[in-house]
Image (cartoon, helix red, strand yellow):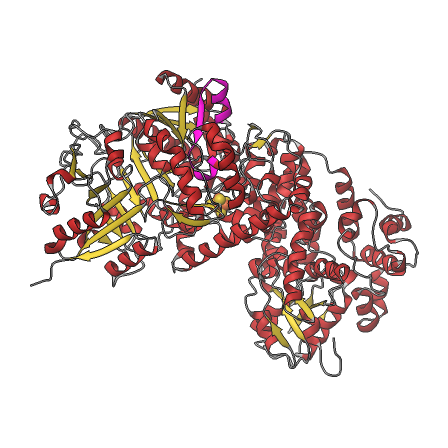
Amino acid sequence: MRVGLFITCVNDTLYPRTGRAVVRLLERLGCEVDFPLAQTCCGQMHWNTGYGPRIEPMVRRFADTFAGYDAVVTPSGSCGAMIRDNHPRAAARAQDPTLAADVAAVVPKVYDLTEFIVDVLGVTDVGAYFPHKVAYHPTCHSQRLMKLGDRPTALLREVRGLELLGLPGEQECCGFGGTFAVKNPDVSTAMGADKVRHAAGTGAEVLCAADNSCLMHIGGLMDRQRTGMRVLHLAEILASTEKEPA
Amino acid sequence: MSSREVILNRVRRALTDVPRDEVFPVPRDYARAHVVEGVLELFAEHLRDYRAVVHEVAESELADAIAEAVVRRGARRVVTPAGLPPAWTAGLAAATCVPDGWVYGPIDDLSDDPTNNRPKPAAPHLTIAELDAADGVLTGAAVGIAETGTIVLDAGPGQGRRALTLVPDWHLCVVRAEHVVASVPQALERLVPGRPLTWISGPSATSDIELDRVEGVHGPRTLEVLIVRRPPVV
Amino acid sequence: MSKAVPPTGATFVGMPPFPRAARDAVGDAQLRHNLRKATHTIRDKRAVVVDELADWAELRAAGAAIKDRTLRRLDEHLLAVEAAVTSAGGTVHWAADAAEANRIVADLVRATGETEVVKVKSMVTQEIGLNEALAAEGIRAYETDLAELIVQLGEDLPSHILVPAIHRNRAEIREIFVREMGEWGVPAPAGLTDEPAALAEAARRHLRERFLSAKVAVSGANFVVAETGTLVVVESEGNGRMCLTLPETLISVVGIEKVVPTWADLEVFLQLLPRSSTGERMNPYTSMWTGVTPGDGPQDFHLVLLDNGRTDVLADRTGRQALRCIRCSACLNVCPVYERTGGHAYGSVYPGPIGAILVPQLGGVATGKVDAQTASLPYASSLCGACYEVCPVAIDIPEVLVHLREQVVEGGGHRAEKAAMRAAEWVLDDPGRLRRVQRLAARSRKLIPKRAPGPGAAWTDSRSIPAVPAESFRDWWVRERSGPADTAQAGVRPTGSAPAAAVVEARESEGEGR
Ligand code: SF4
């Protein structure tokens, strides 16, 4: 199976470790992973901020870049949801039947990393080792739009040495929300502070999620507040082994 | 142009994308009811959940149960709507009963009245002050709904005008088992739209203070329900 | 305490745009405590009673579809309402806007010779500013819903569509009662405690005489059944029944979107609404009346059908789903933004997620005519989707928010943001450029300040900036996994500059720009 990795522009630029972890993990699970260099961004920031009419080139680029793969895997719930829910809308709005057809062809092949591992590969024990206390934050778009359900925690539960701790108010938004974080910084920070408080209260060493954008916000708050906790993308935990710990 | 025309024209202009012959589907695959067994028990349980006082009685015990409830309450003046079965008040002193004469018209002539909303001329009825001076009201009910713990009054015989069950502070309501349905859809099927309807689920309450429910604001602060069991099948 | 400000349209005059108002609200510890307690209480109650119904998803789908079907034939259903109400002995009026509705109501009240009216809690009469309009005509409107009473006595503004005084806790309510009730009528009893039951009792005593002597009442309605002309009011306290039953004249002001076609349609909404709203299987009282019933209830009944911007909402193919709203307030109660700011920050009659999509539309955002306050509302959301999840009529609030953001952008303004977005597009349009920008940032990552000046401060005031890695994923992949051809394709050229200037630098290095 040829897997195209859609790393997302945020991970590409700021979180290459996550990308490397995804590659390592998928190859360990027997996949042939490719990273097509023509990829850039799903257009989510533009779309959600009110610049939807301008993302057509990004939608086109995504559909063209990933047309030839059996599966497209992304380690971001919000980017995955952007592609699944909004690329068809953007294509419809462009009134270009070819684009609409290309998008319709690629969208069903797009998977969040955890979906791909659990549903397509049929695996929950990925052979990981991570001897730490971990709390999982099911980010809004991962839970409500991608509907990842218990896939991430099913994967975490199989990680050797990992103690999974329940996060109170887990389904509540962390307050990132893309440009919301800067357009409404006070509310965003207040929401994030509650998330940090809940996370710190679990006694976990690591807060993990399937989306680095939210973790950037939460981690940024934790750093300022010197909680001593760190944030880590789920993929990095799943890639972690005795030999190559995260 | 009248505002009526203005609004209707605006609506039509707003809907130019909707084909006039469109058939817009409504999926109706929700349940007609969520329970089949134990409807009466559930009705009582849900009434109690919302702080109604509930008694279950046999038909033969009804008059005594009513008299006992009135005594227990210490009620000296109880409003009795027209059409209340005389047997219900058999255990009460005549002076206790404060009759209201209003009746909703018979519903047999539906021919020229699609909303069925033409009651008989009003008989003499109690003033608001007289209602306010009463200690309680005794009524029947049109329908009971088990899933929600609701009683529906439809102004039929023995239920009276809406004000009767509103102004007095105590409402003693007799609900017959055969009038209790499981669900809201089943209740609506039994009710006649044109009639003034009051749906009652527990005593008056509010959630306005810290979104926590407390009973007892403007409506009757005590709702007492006598559920009359079906006679055993012989 | 904020003084009541008469609304214009659906927004309150002179309110600051959302982010600024939100800052004050977030800093108010008492307010945040009150809101958190109340919203979490009701959230949990709702979840329990919704879970009781295994067919909730089907009810929700039916509710959405019934509303859509009705809206798509709204003219026909409105004419049916008019015919049915008229034949049942009521009088139907049509009001194109708030001013006309207020005029109609004021004239009807004056015709009775009365100068006082009792009111059932109604969102729509707040939207049109009816109380203020009546006051200008010498008519005093008494709110009778407990929360509305708290707001009215406290000269406050409503902050929630179901519980307008949700921002007040019991101690504050007691204080308002003790101080103000005497000014308006029956004073608060001596020794009043802040027990909710005692406060409810005080409200009962305060309003009792008023109900028993009222001659005119004004209400809204939750539903109007087109085929029968039946109006439905769903409530808890019995103040609604008092107003709908005891006075001689009843005037109901109802938005044109409240119509449902058939009697049987109520079977869906009477299951969806109470469970979503107060988290009860059924609310304590629901009144249904059809025109006039001789000898029972008001003998003079008027229905005022109100447009006031609703037909503009109807004209927007994405935005029109907002008209499905049954005002249950579940979206407010679950909203993480509302929970932190409360309703006042929204500066409008309809706060929370539904307000953020309804108010801008009622105000004409599609035409680019709204003020800064209204234009800030579609951004008052992190797009977390919790509102959509609980909405009993499946309004995709995030979808509409994004749609309205586009209208705000089209309507002008946001110059710096537009430039930034264009720059981002330029970079993201070409992986080679993206790679160059990444390299520039990586090279100068040591220069990135911990706290950014200007707009960047919005992030760095409370949050650290993530460290820029020495190497992007793309560079790693090219180095580790692919041949020299890919490196050439990536088109990297070494340059050096601070990250803020990276885009500009990259542009210049290509001799390109827009
Ligand atoms: S938008 Fe939906 S959830 Fe919000 S008040 Fe309206 S019906 Fe309720």
Q: Quadrant of the C terminus of chain C?
A: top right
Q: Residue at x 56, y 72 (%)?
A: A119
Q: Is residue C319 left or right of residue A102?
A: left
Is C131 contained in the magenta span? yes
Image position, residue C377 (x, y; %): 62, 40
Q: Determine whether C368 is above or below A130 in the image.
A: above
Q: Determine whether C346 is above or below A47 in the image.
A: above
Q: Determine whether C103 is above or below A148 in the image.
A: above
Is C293 contained in the magenta span? no
**Observer-nearest residue: A223 or C193?**
C193
Q: Is residue C185 left or right of residue C292?
A: right
**Observer-nearest residue: A54 or C501?**
C501
**What span is colored magenta in the figure?**
C130-149
Image position, residue C123 (x, y; %): 47, 35
The quadrant holding residue A23 is bottom right
Q: Residue at x 83, y 52 (%)?
A: C451
Q: Is residue C256 left or right of residue B66?
A: right
Image position, residue C255 (x, y; %): 44, 32
Q: How many marks?
A: 0
Residue found farthest to the bottom: A243
Image position, residue C484 (x, y; %): 86, 69
Q: Is residue C192 left or right of residue A96?
A: left
Q: Quadrant of the N terminus of chain C?
A: top right
